[in-house]
Image (tube, rainbow, N blue to C red):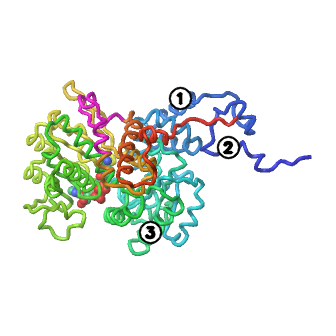
Amino acid sequence: MTTQQPSDLHLGVKILHDPVRNKGTAFTDAERQALKLTGLLPPRIHSMAEQELRVLGNVRAKPTDLERYLYLIALQDRNETLFYRVVMNNIEEMMPILYTPTVGKACQEFQHIYRKPRGFYVSLNDRGNVREMLQNWPHKDARIIVVTDGGRILGLGDLGADGMGIPIGKLSLYTACAGIHPTQCLPVMLDVGTDNERLLNDPLYNGIEQRRERGAAYDELVEEFISAASEVFPGVLIQLEDFGNSNAFRFLKHYRDRTCLFNDDIQGTGAVAVAGVIAALRITGGKLSDQKLLFLGAGEAGIGIADVFVAALVEQGLSAEQARERCWFVDSTGMVVKSRENLAVHKLPFAHDHEGCDDFLSAVKMLRPTAILGLSGQPNTFTEDVIKAMADINERPIIFALSNPTSMAECTAEQAYTLSDGRAVFASGSPFDPVTIANQTFVPGQGNNAYIFPGVGLGVIASQSRTVTDEMFLAAAHSLANQVSDSDIERGRIYPSLARIREVSALIARDVAKIAYDNKLTDKEEPEDILADVREHMYKPVYPHYA
Ligand code: NAD
């Protein structure tokens, strides 16, 4: 008599519980026989298209976006291939659920909606053990890590360990938008405590029970993590995400030459917003070098945009100093000018020798910008007076209310269009519905970083670049702007349709990879057809055949 091995006995059950291999009711008869699945599934075999229909029906029947988020994450935990098929085929509908604004709500509720672990947690208490812990990650071929310390989640502030929803969401977008294989994506939370009282007082909070560490122990943990990750997963691309602003600038500067690393909040935002400005000029007319940008908010996003804008003007022949004179900032203490004391280091290059003022409206009137960009995390700050002043100064004012989530946008799409008599070229960070005024429909652009980071990541991975350079983000901005069609522009839309995101990402990746080859940032030989090589790296959500 032969005895069955437990591993053999449970093969079918194991496969059904493995989201990477599970096909649910799509397993064929032959597969059910071979994998010991007979009896464990209802007899009817469904195609993936039928499974997708069922999922869509369920998602749409949910009463709230948060419920939709929970349903989709549960699907991701159950059957990853089907999850990505649904997301990719319905990206415009799914992105606001898996990313901003719903992911913000999910992070705020994380301690209550928590079901199943996803991603990798490293806390202050793990110092000294990070390299060993990373060996526990089940997939040995991690190519992209998105890591946060939860310090500044979207525009929602410190959410501590509950910020994990952001790396998870961003990596889902890497797969959905650029085809990075799901098993190559590693979401990481560096839990260094939180100063969020609501979380500290909630017994269900998932993070360590202590205030946010800001001293040497914090820096040591970041150092240990980045060194260990680069060692355990050689060549891995690390994306810093939603760190508080002084840490974000500091770590980017410190690690970018040493490791393959970038900061999406700074550099990705820079590229997506500059692409929007370049595309907007097809509506407003005028040259890039004639634009004057006035930012509300001088943090990671605002300075990141200004840096890419300066690089774009330098490319056109301006000196860096001349280019910086086209960028002006108002932050929480007023206009950023030379005479202000104790300005943060990242603001200094943009502190002009000019009379200051306390409020944004005065700055608009004084500087007469062609574009205003909101990155303050403060809603209703592009007031009626501000929008009207911009419409008085410019025939076609550029108004970007980029703060996330939707509730934090500096103004709504409707306000921008109505108060400018339909003349504003508007974009936001989170999506707004089209607005109809006097029979004319305006389609707001969504300056979503998802247009940029997946393509940049794909380009870096495909080319095996050792570093991520500023030039790559400028190239990504041009690539994105070039992909806005004439029909998009006719509808007032300055970003391509999200439905085209995989193609957009592939072309961005090609341009990013080209920079890696041209600048010898990689040991890989330049392929004859870079785009074809990039496409070969793109995952498709198709079930494998097991029998
Ligand atoms: P940050 O904390 O680094 O910077 C915020 C800045 O806003 C600071 O300079 C602060 O002084 C300023 N500020 C705060 N209150 C203000 C007020 N009342 N008036 C004027 N300025 C004020 O944050 P960040 O990373 O730069 O992000 C800012 C916002 O931009 C967030 O809401 C974020 O979600 C959004 N964002 C959008 C995109 C996008 O749309 N693609 C990308 C990144 C960030």
Q: Mark 1 points at which residue?
A: 53
The part of the chain drawn in magenta is 476-497
Of the pair 258 and 95, the residue shown nearer to us: 258
Task: Name the secondary structure under disc 2.
Answer: helix
Q: Tell me which image quadrant ligand 1 sits in.
A: bottom left
Q: Measuring from the top left, give residue 538's x and y in whole percent.
A: 48, 40
Amino acid type shown at disc 2: Ile
Label 1 and label 3: CA atoms lie apart by 46 Å
The residue labelled by disc 3 is 223
Percent position of residue 359, x then y: 14, 56
Tell me which amino acid carries mark 1.
Leu
| Residue to which mark 2 is pinned | 15
- Residue count near mark 2 (Cα–Cα under 10 Å), binned few <14, some 14–19, many ≥20: some
Q: Front-most of 381 and 251?
A: 251
Q: x, y percentage for residue 461?
A: 45, 49
508 to 520, vertically: above or below: above
* Residue 428 visible: yes
Q: Which of marks 1 and 2 is nearer the N terminus?
A: 2
| Residue drawn where x is 18% and y is 34% of the image | 283
Circle 1 SS class:
helix
